[in-house]
Structure formats: C-alpha cells, structure tokens
Image (tube, rainbow, N blue to C red):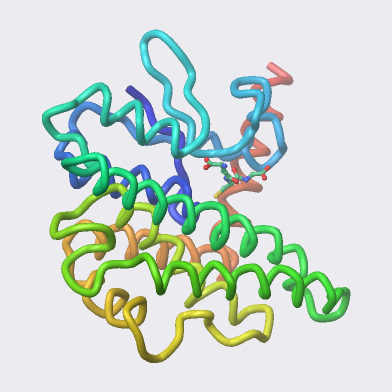
C-alpha cells in the first residue's frame, strides 16, 4: 500500500498515527507528489484532489475517515475503533467532532491568515463554529485515559492533529487557541502528548509547519515543479 501524505496535513497525520499505532508501518510506503499536489493536478489521480490518499493493489481510496475504516477492516486484529458498540459510537463521535467541527472550520479559516486582506466576519463565523465544537468535545471526551476509552483508538488519531491545529494554526488568525486552559480537553491535551504515537505525529507536524514558515517547503515545491516541467519537455 502507498499513502499519499504530507507532514503538516492533519488528515494525513491522523492516518499516519493509526498506521504507527497498529504496527503496520512496514506494509505502507509514504509519498507526496509535491508538483502534482501544489499545482492542483492530484485530481488526475484522485478526483477529490486532497490528501491523504491510500493506493492499494485494487483501488485508490480518498478521505481520511474512509481510509481509517479500510485499515481497521483490513487488519481486524489490530483495529482501533473500540471494543463494543457504545465505545465504537464514542470513538466515531469524537472523530467526527475533530474532523468536521474543528479541522474543517480551521482549514477554511486559513484563507484569512493574511491580515491585509482578512475578512473578520469570516474568521468570526468559523471560530464560532470551532468554539462550539470544542464545547461538544469537552462534554464527550473521557475524564482520564484516552479520548474515548481506556485504550488508544481512532478518536485519538483524529483528535491529536486537530488539537495541534487549534494550538499552532488558529493563533495565526490573531485568535487565541480554542483549547481552554482548564477542563477535560486541556487535561487530555497535556496527557496525550506523552504517548509515543501522538508525540511522533506531533513532531512531524511541527517539522511541516517549520518548513512552511521558513520557506523550505516553497523551495522544495519550486524544485519539484521545475523537474516536472523539464520531464514534460523531454
Ligand atoms: N475530508 C478530507 C479532507 C482532506 C483535506 O482537506 N486535505 C488537505 C490537506 S490536509 C488537502 O489535500 N488540501 C488540498 C486542497 O484543498 O486542494 C479527509 O478527511 O481526508
């Protein structure tokens, strides 16, 4: 299998964390066709045009949640979706809160990162939704242990990158992190960073953020674009 993934992509980080935690890293190659991704040509390969994408011998699978389920279905003995119907429901609820109410809105708000062209109304609307999602998360997240149970599940794999975005991306909009200083989410966030799989994807995301902010990513993309252009001319 091949996973098309990027360091800073939270939806990709979620799948990488699941792969690391399931212990199936040897079964997966990791790749990012930089020129295709940054020129919007990933759609030629996967119509949704977004990462992560899992390539198997039989199909191209887009959408992180669908990939996560595919991995659980493929390795049922290592599945991370919980042990009984209620636990599985909790895992899915927390994963959806992180995906839909936190990450999606934060992603859309990134279009307003430039202060000079910022539409504050858009920021306020989207941050209102993020804070509402955070309130729901506070109610659903476990008091101790992991996000949805006493074991690491897919809920943690989705939530860890989402909370990284809350802490590191939201402040770029001149808005404080939506993670409150106290409460179950705050305690969870402090605890989970000691988990080896969480720590690993968080350091990958931090590496991706650094590359974006210091211009390294831009340089790599320009080089990949130039190579792709030269290959076309051959
Ligand atoms: N719902 C998708 C969202 C994936 C997504 O938005 N990925 C971003 C990177 S984190 C992307 O590929 N963006 C490229 C674009 O918007 O063209 C999922 O869960 O996989």
Quadrant hosting ligand 1: top right
Give above or below for 175 relative to 208. Answer: below
Residue 151 image point, x, y percent: 14, 55
Where is residue 76, by image quadrant?
A: top left
Viewed as shown, does residue 1 lie left or right of 210? left
Viewed as shown, does residue 124 lie left or right of 218? right
**203 or 198, nearer to the observer:** 198
Which residue extends farthest front?
86
Where is residue 132, by image quadrant?
A: bottom right
Instruction: Residue at 48% x, 77% y: name it.
Output: 167
**53 or 186, nearer to the observer:** 186
Viewed as shown, does residue 99 lie left or right of 154? right
Image quadrant where one finds the N terminus: top left
Give above or below for 172 relative to 163. Answer: below
Q: How many marks?
A: 0
Instruction: Residue at 44% x, 38% y: name it.
Output: 65
Viewed as shown, does residue 68 lie left or right of 121? left
Where is residue 24, by image quadrant?
A: top left
Residue 170 image point, x, y percent: 59, 75
**43 or 219, nearer to the observer:** 43
Residue 10 image point, x, y percent: 47, 54
Residue 115 image point, x, y percent: 80, 80
Give above or below for 35 relative to 212. Answer: above
Which residue extends farthest bottom?
181
Instruction: Residue at 19% x, 41% y: name it.
Output: 84
Image quadrant where one finds the C terminus: top right
Instruction: Residue at 37% x, 65% y: name it.
Output: 140
């Amino acid at each position: 299998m091949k996973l098309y993934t990027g360091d800073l992509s939270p939806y990709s980080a979620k799948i990488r964390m699941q792969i690391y935690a399931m212990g199936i890293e040897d079964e997966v190659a990791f790749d990012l066709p930089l020129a295709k991704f940054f020129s919007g040509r990933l759609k030629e390969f996967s119509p949704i045009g977004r990462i992560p994408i899992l390539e198997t011998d039989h199909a191209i699978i887009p959408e992180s949640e669908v990939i996560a389920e595919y991995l659980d279905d493929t390795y049922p003995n290592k599945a991370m979706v919980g042990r009984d119907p209620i636990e599985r429901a909790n895992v899915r609820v927390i994963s959806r809160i992180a995906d839909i109410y936190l990450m999606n809105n934060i992603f859309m708000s990134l279009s307003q990162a430039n202060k000079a062209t910022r539409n504050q109304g858009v920021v306020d609307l989207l941050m209102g939704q993020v804070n509402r999602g955070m309130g729901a998360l506070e109610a659903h997240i476990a008091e101790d242990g992991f996000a949805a149970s006493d074991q690491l599940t897919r809920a943690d794999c989705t939530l860890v990158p989402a909370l990284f975005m809350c802490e590191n991306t939201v402040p770029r909009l001149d808005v404080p992190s939506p993670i409150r200083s106290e409460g179950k989410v705050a305690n969870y966030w402090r605890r989970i960073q000691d988990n080896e799989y969480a720590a690993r994807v968080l350091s990958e995301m931090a590496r991706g953020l650094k590359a974006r902010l210091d211009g390294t990513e831009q340089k790599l993309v320009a080089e990949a674009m130039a190579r792709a252009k030269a290959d076309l001319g051959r």
